[in-house]
């Protein structure tokens, strides 16, 4: 890529959502799109790590996601965007107001992809607490950070493998608890921090700490596209977008709307999607065959398979759903090295579990 082209890409990435490249215009990369959509349907899937070489639309796709996510309703004057009718997911302030019977003011707003820059300080991430003010005036003055902005949004870390260890620890704590707790000299503030964690990385630039890798519900390995026609299509679309973003976006507006409607419908269907016992057993057996540590693999496989069934408008999870999401859920959880003899790949483990528990 020459310097001029790169500058165009960068400029396009940094512009606001009205001139953003549309999600529906991404060519191929179905696993990446599906992984993001499954998380949008069921946040419990646990986020996505996108690994791959440069220039494979990783960041373009992640940034484009926000626009196809359904709008969210928030408490209008709350810095954390609390959900107005779910007291168990509110900040202490909103909970108090809700429980006192106050009618909370609401507004509807689009979801956002909130960036965690590599050079962010820990204070920028968690927010700053003015301890002096707390001690002298008894007032808890808290300046919310990135985790506050990320609540009920997407938290995006580009080059996540290069993130400072200290920030990784903070991020893991918040992701595990679904809240951010800031404590300074006996004064503490807490607020909800439930976000869809999305990271992108180029494996050539360093690996990811295993604790962080394991936290990502899904991992997608993205490769460049070799098909000549598809490559032509990619550059044609990019040229058309750069020439006139508004016309290009208008061409994809219907597809974008349709996608949002599918996500909304899938979210509504999700609670009713069932998992028959043979499929439950197959999920467990796949994890056993692959010698996956712990039970996070089972849980995530079940959640992702249910989200996929909901997305395809199917009320019952089948082994096909499990098969389709298994590589996203399990590839990064394999403990054995690929050259070890005992290693069974994900595909063979699914086949074996299918024979054992699902086929007649
Ligand atoms: N499958 C695709 N569909 C549409 N556009 C694509 C596709 N693959 C690459 N592109 C285009 O290639 C350019 C590079 O994409 P992007 O910056 O998202 O890559 P990246 O994987 O995030 O790379 P980097 O790690 O260098 O940031 C963008 O202009 C993007 O529009």
Image (spheres, rainbow, N blue to C red):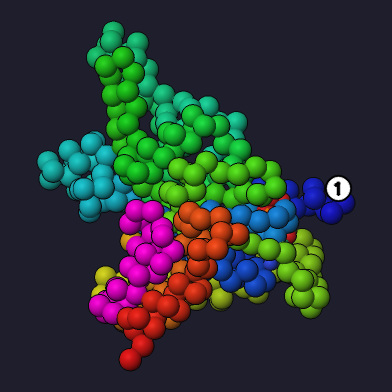
Which of the 4 quarters of the picture holds residue 169?
top left
Which quarter of the figure is the N terminus placed in? bottom right
Residue 193 in the image, given as x and y percentages of width and height: 36, 42
* 255 to 205, vertically: above or below: below
* 263 to 179, vertically: above or below: below
Which quarter of the figure is the C terminus placed in? bottom left
Residue 255 in the image, given as x and y percentages of width and height: 56, 76
Q: Residue at point 45% right, 79% down?
A: 351
Q: Which residue is mark 1?
A: 3
Nearer to me, 343 or 66? 343
Give the magenta range.
Answer: 273-298
Indicate yes or no whether the magenta region holds residue 165: no
Furthest toward the bottom, the residue is 360
Residue 198 in the image, given as x and y percentages of width and height: 51, 51
Question: Is any part of residue 312 visible from this angle?
Answer: no
- Helix, strand or loop status at disc 1: helix
**Residue 16 as seen in the image, left or right of residue 36:** right
| The image quadrant in which ligand 1 is located | bottom right
Residue 151 in the image, given as x and y percentages of width and height: 39, 45
């Amino acid at each position: 890529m020459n310097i001029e082209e790169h500058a165009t890409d960068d400029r396009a990435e940094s512009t606001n959502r009205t001139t953003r490249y549309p999600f529906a215009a991404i060519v191929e990369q179905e696993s990446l799109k599906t992984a993001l959509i499954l998380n949008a349907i069921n946040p419990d899937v646990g986020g996505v790590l996108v690994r791959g070489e440069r220039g494979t639309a990783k960041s373009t796709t992640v940034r484009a996601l926000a626009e196809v996510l359904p709008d969210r309703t928030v408490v209008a004057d709350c810095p954390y965007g609390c959900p107005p009718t779910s007291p168990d997911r509110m900040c202490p302030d909103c909970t108090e107001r809700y429980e006192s019977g106050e009618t909370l003011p609401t507004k509807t707003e689009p979801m956002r992809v909130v960036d965690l820059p590599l050079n962010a300080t820990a204070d920028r991430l968690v927010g700053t607490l003015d301890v002096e003010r707390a001690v002298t005036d008894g007032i808890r003055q808290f300046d919310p950070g990135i985790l506050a902005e990320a609540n009920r949004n997407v938290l995006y870390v580009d080059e996540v493998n290069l993130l400072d260890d200290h920030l990784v620890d903070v991020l893991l704590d918040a992701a595990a608890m679904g809240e951010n707790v800031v404590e300074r000299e006996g004064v503490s503030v807490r607020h909800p921090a439930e976000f869809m964690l999305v990271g992108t990385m180029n494996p050539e630039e360093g690996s990811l700490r295993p604790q962080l890798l394991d936290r990502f519900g899904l991992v997608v390995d993205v490769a460049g596209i070799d098909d000549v026609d598809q490559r032509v299509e990619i550059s044609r679309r990019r040229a058309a977008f750069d020439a006139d973003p508004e016309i290009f976006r208008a061409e994809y507006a219907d597809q974008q709307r349709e996608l949002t409607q599918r996500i909304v419908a899938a979210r509504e269907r999700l609670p009713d999607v069932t998992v028959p016992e043979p499929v439950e057993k197959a999920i467990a057996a796949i994890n056993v065959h692959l010698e996956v540590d712990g039970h996070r693999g089972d849980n995530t496989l079940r959640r992702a398979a249910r989200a996929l069934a909901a997305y395809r408008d199917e009320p019952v999870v089948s082994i096909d759903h499990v098969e389709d999401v298994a590589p996203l859920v399990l590839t990064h959880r394999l403990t054995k090295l690929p050259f070890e003899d005992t290693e069974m790949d994900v595909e063979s483990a699914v086949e074996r579990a299918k024979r054992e528990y699902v086929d007649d």
